[in-house]
Image: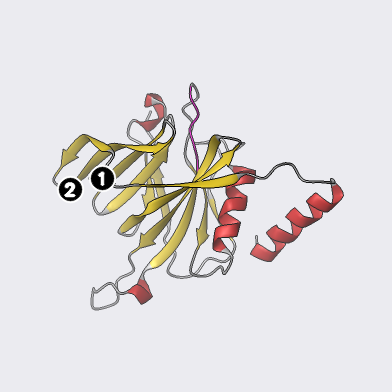
Amino acid sequence: MKLRTVLAACAAFAAANGPAMAENRSEYTKLDLDNGCVAISEYEAGGSWSCEGYKGYGILFSEGDLRQSVFYGYVGEWYAEGAFESFGGFNNVSGTIEWRLDGDTPVAAIQRWFIDNPEETGEQTDETRGQVLVVAKVAQPGVGDGCVVGYVDARENTQANELARQIADEMAPGFRCRVDQPEYHGEQGLLAGEPMRTFGP
């Protein structure tokens, strides 16, 4: 769905339904493996870490074969075991996480991913590196259900941050992990990576 169509539909809904409810707000935290993270396992090609997030809502970070994966919140063991959501191409995440809060409860997280698209020479440049905002559902205590909800190509959409927040606020709460499939929203360019995901038992 095109960005202008999404925003127009949202405006039309608000106009038809009177004053809007209080909007979600954003808080920001940093992801730094050398500060606030505890190694769960480490090996030559990567590992996994448990990191501080937002007010008790932690972060599970994994890396393997030059690809990274992040889950947010109180992720259940049944869900996190063996789970990995990333992109087919080599990639890495930004160190900043935007948490979307309903009241004081984080319902979604937004993080920028950098996707490698090497030129024919094999060299990676800023011009060939994709940038994707990944919107994820935050797992809640006693539920443990957290996963990617949607993607926004930050290079192709001038209002990428606004679109990502809209996806976070409207889609994350009701998104059914391992049932619903995350998709790109807005324009998707050639540098945006193709998602990949595997889940545990």
Give the side of residue 11 with respect to residue 59, left or right: right
The residue pinned by badge 2 equals: 45
Secondary structure of the residue carrying numbered label 1: loop
Q: Position of residue 77 (x, y in %)?
A: 37, 25
Q: Position of residue 10 (x, y in %)?
A: 74, 54
Give the side of residue 21 with respect to residue 94, left or right: right
Between discs 1 and 2, the one toward the N terminus: 1
The residue pinned by badge 1 equals: 33
Read off the magenta span. 136-141
Q: Position of residue 184 (x, y in %)?
A: 54, 57
Q: Nearer the viewer, residue 5 or 49?
A: 49
Q: Amino acid at mark 2?
A: Ala
Q: Compared with residue 170, is residue 5 higher up or lower down, i.e. above or below?
A: below
Q: Compared with residue 201, is residue 10 higher up or lower down, i.e. above or below?
A: below
Tell me the quarter of the picture where residue 116 sits: bottom left
Q: Amino acid at mark 1?
A: Leu
Rounded to the nearest angstrom, the CA distance separating label 1 from label 2 is: 15 Å
Q: Compared with residue 195, is residue 38 higher up or lower down, i.e. above or below?
A: above
Who's the residue at 37% across and 76% down the image? 127
Residue 10 seen: yes
Q: Position of residue 95 (x, y in %)?
A: 35, 53
